[in-house]
Amino acid sequence: MTAEDVLEQYEARINQHDFDALVPLISNDAVFWFNDGSFSGLAEIRRAFEATWERFANEVYWLEDKSWIALGEGAASCTYHFRWKTEMDGEAMSGSGRGTTVLRTESGHWKIIHEHLSGMPG
């Protein structure tokens, strides 16, 4: 898979709400930065994802406006806008923000090493 393929798979698999489906795409020593904290390694990242899915069981997440700002043999980086929608207590909710994903090759396979998501400036 190319770096682009990995990001597309990641986007699709997030909506399965099964972290085990994401594990093959994420480096063991990845660092993810979200508005609610920084998470290092698969165990911490798993806890962050699973807490979100527990709170928003029917959340749907997607990426728009992807821009590959670096794409080399061993490293790649993509910026984008992310969007999500869910329902809580019968009420529709949605949101959006900006994101950056950095990938690197590990033993010939592309893996996500860093993700940074933040709200839109306002």
Image (cartoon, rainbow, N blue to C red):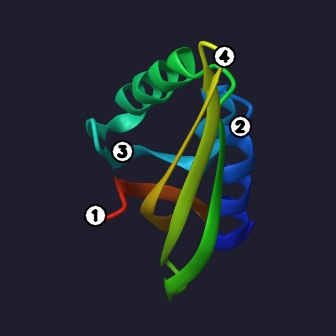
Image point (44%, 62%), residue name: 99
SS of the residue under disc 4: loop
**Which marked residue is nearer to the observer: mark 4 or mark 3?**
4
- Numbered circle sitting on residue 122: 1
| Comes first in the chain, label 1 or label 4 | 4
Label 4 and label 3: CA atoms lie apart by 38 Å
Which one is in front in this view, the residue at disc 1 or the one at disc 3?
A: 1
For mark 3, what is the residue?
A: 29
Q: Do callouts 1 and 4 mark residues in contact (Cβ within 8 Å)?
A: no
Please rate how many residues cluster around mark 3, counting C-alpha atoms within 10 Å: few if below 14, some from 14 to 19, many from 20.
Answer: few
Q: Position of residue 19 (x, y in %)?
A: 60, 28
- Location of the N terminus by quadrant is bottom right
Quarter of the image that includes the C terminus: bottom left
Compute the Cα span from label 1 to label 2: 27 Å
Q: Residue 58: which quarter of the image? A: top right
Disc 3 element = strand
Crowd rating for badge 2 (residues with CA inside 10 Å; few <14, some 14–19, many 20+): some
Q: Which of marks 3 and 2 is nearer the N terminus?
A: 2
Mark 1 and mark 2 in contact? Answer it, CB < 8 Å.
no
- Name the residue tied to disc 2: 15
1 or 2: tag closer to the N-terminus: 2
Q: Residue at x 54, y 58 (%)?
A: 82
Residue type at the position of mark 4: Gly
- Would you say residue 105 is visible in this rendering? no
